[in-house]
Image (tube, rainbow, N blue to C red):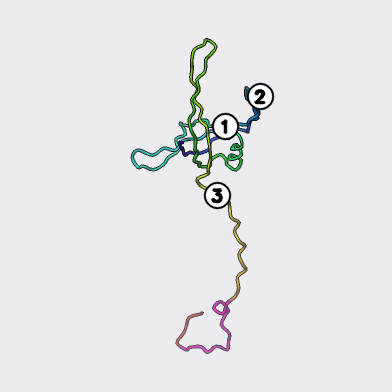
Amino acid sequence: MAKITGKIVYIYPTQQLQSKSGSAFQKRDFVVAMQSFDRDTGEPTIDEGNTPVLTITGERCSQLDNISKGDIVTVDFYLRGRRYRDENNKEKIITDINVTSVRVNTPRLIPVATPPQAAPVESAATTPATESQPKDPNDDLPF
């Protein structure tokens, strides 16, 4: 089993298909911009030019229901190669990327409502001085 990490670029709708044997199945394609690492700094970067189309099948298609464009995900998959003969009877090989799981690495930010601010309350420090307070004769400050 292999893993890749990257940013979701696009998620296609789930397709309801029928196999050659007549049984129904579903598949869902999605595009991931692969994460790579900067050669100089070692920091992870998203390579927008490296965007494979991946396919998830069966009940696992629902794993993409709560994932959105821009999410950073880790995808577990395995490769499967199949031989077939084309219309000229020449043998060819097709390689499938079979996804087993898709997980969001960083949660999407959900805006948090700012609580209302309470009205200012007057305190003893903000109340003006009254005439009953004794005054210092050397104090010529107006406050």
**Stretch in magenta:** 123-137
Mark 3 vs mark 1: give the one in front: 1
Q: Residue at x 60, y 43 (%)?
A: 66
Spot occupied by residue 140 in the image (x, y as percentages of width and height): 47, 83
Q: Secondary structure at mark 1?
A: strand
Residue type at mark 1? Answer: Asp
- Of labels 3 and 1, earlier in sequence is 1
Q: 2 or 124, which lies in front?
A: 2
State the residue position of label 2.
22
Q: Residue at x 49, y 28 (%)?
A: 80
Residue 109 numbered mark, or none: 3
Q: Secondary structure at mark 3?
A: loop
Magenta-drawn stretch, dominant element (helix, strand or loop): loop
Residue 38 numbered mark, or none: none
Q: 83 or 88, which lies in front?
A: 83
- Of labels 2 and 1, earlier in sequence is 2
Residue type at mark 3? Answer: Leu
Q: 38 or 77, which lies in front?
A: 77
State the residue position of label 1.
29
